[in-house]
Image: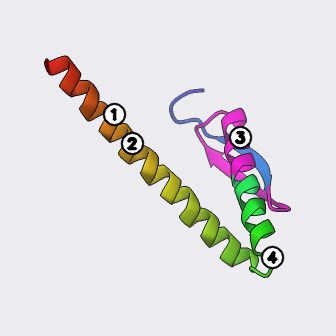
Amino acid sequence: MAQNDKARVTVEIYNRNYTIVGKEDSSHVNLVASQVDQKMREIHDANQQLTTAELAVLTAVNTMNDYMKLKEDYAALMRSQNKKEDK
């Protein structure tokens, strides 16, 4: 795909269709959408009275929390690796 080309991929997340436009492969977009759908369903199973908007916000907060933890773990791993290389 050329650098300026964008693909349109329609995905289903929590029983709604969304068209995603971007440079990622359709398989990657589908995987991401599947993970978002799965996380929303997990949160819904634990708290069924949430509105879709509340569910979406909690999914975003949970996902960002997971991302930030992974980012911190990666930074710690890189610091550890750099210390080993300096020895």
Residue at image location 70% in from the left, 57% down from the top:
39
Measured along the vertical axis of the image, is residue 82 above or below residue 69?
above
Nearer to us in this view, 24 or 43: 43
Q: Which mark is residue 77?
A: 1
Q: CA distance from mark 3 to mark 2?
A: 23 Å
Q: Secondary structure at mark 1?
A: helix
Would residue 15 appear left or right of 46 to someone viewing this image? Answer: right
Mark 3 crowdedness (10 Å alpha carbons): few <14, some 14-19, many ≥20: few
Screen quadrant of the N terminus: top right
Q: CB atoms at circles 4 and 1 under 8 Å apart? A: no
For the residue pair 27 and 20, the one nearer the viewer reads as: 27
In front of the other: 7 or 11: 11
Q: Position of residue 49 (x, y in %)?
A: 79, 82
Query: Which residue bears the numbered disc 2?
Result: 73
Mark carried by residue 48: 4
Q: 10 Å neighbourhood of mark 2: few (<14), some, or many (≥20)?
A: few
**Distance between the Cα atoms at labels 1 and 2?**
6 Å
Q: Which residues are magenta?
A: 13-35
Question: Which sits earlier in the primary sequence, circle 2 or circle 4?
Answer: 4
Which three-letter amino acid code belongs to the residue tagged 3?
Leu
Res 8 label: none
Q: Does residue 59 lie above or below 74 as drawn?
A: below
**Residue 5 sits in quarter:** top right
Give the residue type at disc 4: Gln
Residue plotted at (64% across, 48% down):
21
Mark 2 or mark 3, which is nearer the start of the sequence? 3
The amino acid at mark 2 is Asp
**Measuring 20% from the left and 18% from the top, which residue is drawn there?**
85
Residue 2, position in %: x, y?
55, 27
Question: Mark 4 or mark 1, which has the lower sequence index?
Answer: 4
The residue tagged 3 is 31
